[in-house]
Image (spheres, helix red, strand yellow):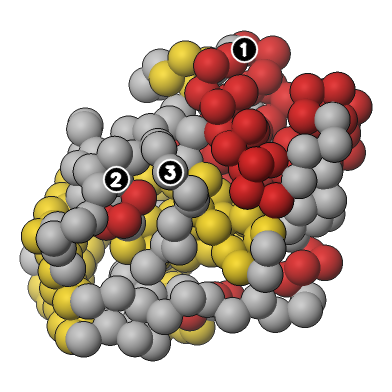
Amino acid sequence: MNRTVSSRLVARTQPGTRLVYAVAAVRDPGYDSFAEDLAVTIDGVPASVTEVADHHGGRFHVLDTPEAAEVVFEYRAEVGGQADSPVADPADLIRYVRPSRYCESDKLLPTSYAEFGALQGVELLHAVREWVAAELAYVPGSSRPIDGAVDTLLARRGVCRDYAHLVASLLRGKNVPARLAACYAPGLDPMDFHAVVEAYVDGAWHVVDATGLAPRQGLLRISTGADASDTAFLSTVAGSLRLTELKVDAAWDAAAGDSADPGAGIPVILR
């Protein structure tokens, strides 16, 4: 399996802005090949960025603009093969059962038990995925950046991050470790960054994507965390900006036997 991904972000910043990008693919062990290129300009002049390690192999690229400026950030990667299955850190199995900012599993615990009863393991993952897919409508632009899983359930609509927050919350309510993963998603239409859930059952992490919008076998990890607050593709830790352009591309050459069905079958490892 070979994947080619790219992203282009253009932003206008205010003086004294620090930009933090999380768009680089994770260099997970096991790939046959991994090549990437990053180009950044400030008002047309090439600029350097600082790379900072994040959790689970993610990487931040940090850039400062002392004056107001236009920043163009372009990333491209070609990745061959599949990564090794991620190892479960004992701390992750505690951290990702707890409620978080956008995954209010404590508030949704009664709902989780009422809907899914004594279900466990992969059977529970399937049930939660199908329930969320049936209860929500995918409506671009229908949710706010501050909406959490409870807001999504009440509104009965959202985008990929909202689906992921609700899935993770319901699983955590059943004491299943569940975390959000931002990724490139070949086959996604319209193309954008994508959010899915990784849930730990039966001794392994499995992907759950209730949107069913992209083949899970082609997903390429960017960042992983408790919820969208840990996986934003662009944020500021000082100053402010206005995003004026966002373009994401992702393509793959599926290997023989890879299923194009994004929802059926046992959940697959994100790699």
Q: CA distance from mark 1 to mark 2?
A: 26 Å
Q: Amino acid at mark 1?
A: Ala
Q: Earlier in the sequence, mark 1 or mark 2?
A: 1
Can you identify the residue that label 1 sits on?
155
Can you identify the residue that label 3 sits on?
265
Image quadrant occupied by the C terminus:
bottom left
Q: CA distance from mark 3 to mark 1?
A: 29 Å
User: Residue at horizontal 77%, vertical 68%?
Assistant: 93
Can you identify the residue that label 2 sits on?
215
206 vs 64, left or right, is right
Q: Earlier in the sequence, mark 3 or mark 2?
A: 2
Image coordinates of residue 94 in percent, x first then y, are 82, 67
CB under 8 Å between callouts 3 and 1?
no
Query: Mark 1 falls on what kind of element?
Result: helix
254 vs 150, left or right, is left
Q: Earlier in the sequence, mark 3 or mark 1?
A: 1
Q: CA distance from mark 3 to mark 2?
A: 12 Å
Query: Mark 3 falls on what kind of element?
Result: loop
User: Residue at horizontal 36%, vertical 77%?
Assistant: 83
Mark 3 or 1: in front is 3
Mark 1 or 2: in front is 2
Whether residue 237 is visible: no
Front-most of residues 155 and 239: 155
Image coordinates of residue 176 in percent, x first then y, are 76, 53
Q: Is residue 103 above or below residue 250?
A: above
Q: Amino acid at mark 2?
A: Pro
Q: Which mark is residue 14?
A: none
